[in-house]
Amino acid sequence: MNKEKIQQLEEEIKNLHYRPTNLKHSFSNVETKEFYCWFWDIHIKPVIEYSKQMAEKYGADVDAVWVGAILHDVARLTDEEPHDEIGSQKGYEMLLEKGFDENFAQKVKNIILRHRCKNYPPESLEEKVVASADAMAHFIPPFYLWISKYSNMSFAEVLEKNTKKIDRDFNDKIFFEDEKKLVEAQYNVLKNWFEFKI
Ligand SMILES: [Fe+2]
């Protein structure tokens, strides 16, 4: 029962990325559409895959992790920050509306709230799984090209900011040694790129 409902939810959120209804701040129609389309394909989709694989492997609640991954960046669709806090409340309400039970919705709410490991560090296994998957997905090769294409920072700032981001993702957000090893080679490649000095 839950699986079918979750599949429907995934389809619905995917469609919101493929056909965004809100114009992204300072973006044209075409840019908004392209931005969110790729956001789904190179970020949300891999976060879902990594999360489900880790949930099976480490014995976490697969359904909660799956929904948490689908909704972890839901507030980004409307450009709202802090997207962990706003998204967790939005996701929670959405799940109750769709008839998921309160306990489940609460679990997902905490997964969304804690996925950035910023002000709210993950505590439960499910929260650690999605936070790790989020960080791992940042090491998928086109991710940083995509980020840089839409950045309004100078190139030097992009390099500096991304150096910090990959260090934080690799060192503080991936909670499992096996998964750290999976992205280690790519971490080293990106580190060479971003720390390039003339
Ligand atoms: Fe994310």
Image (tube, helix red, strand yellow):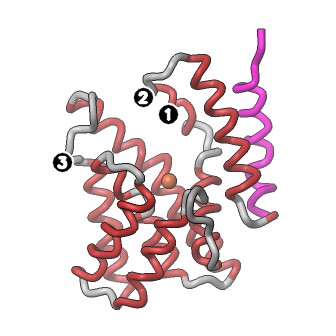
The answer to whether the residue labelled 1 contacts the one labelled 2, judged by CB atoms less than 8 Å apart, is: yes
Residue at point 41%, 62% (across, down): 85
The three-letter code of the residue at mark 3 reads Thr
Q: Residue at 27% of width from left, 64% of height from top?
A: 12
- Left or right side of 121 for 13: left
Vertical comparison of 154 with 171: above or below:
above
Q: What's the distance in space between the residues labelled 1 and 2, CA to CA?
A: 6 Å
- Secondary structure of residue under mark 3: loop
Residue bearing mark 1: 147
Which secondary structure class fits the magenta region best?
A: helix
At horizontal 68% and vertical 37% (from top left) the residue drawn is 164
Q: Quadrant of the N terminus?
A: bottom left
Residue 21 got which mark? Answer: 3
**In this view, 51 is above or below 192:** below
Quadrant in the rendering for residue 198: top right
| Region of the chain picked out in magenta, as a range | 178-198
Percent across and percent down for residue 101 are 34, 90
Residue 74 — which label?
A: none
The CA span between labels 3 and 2 is 19 Å
Look at 76% across and 52% down and name the residue there: 171
Identity, as a three-letter code, of the amino acid under mark 2:
Tyr
Q: Earlier in the sequence, mark 3 or mark 2?
A: 3
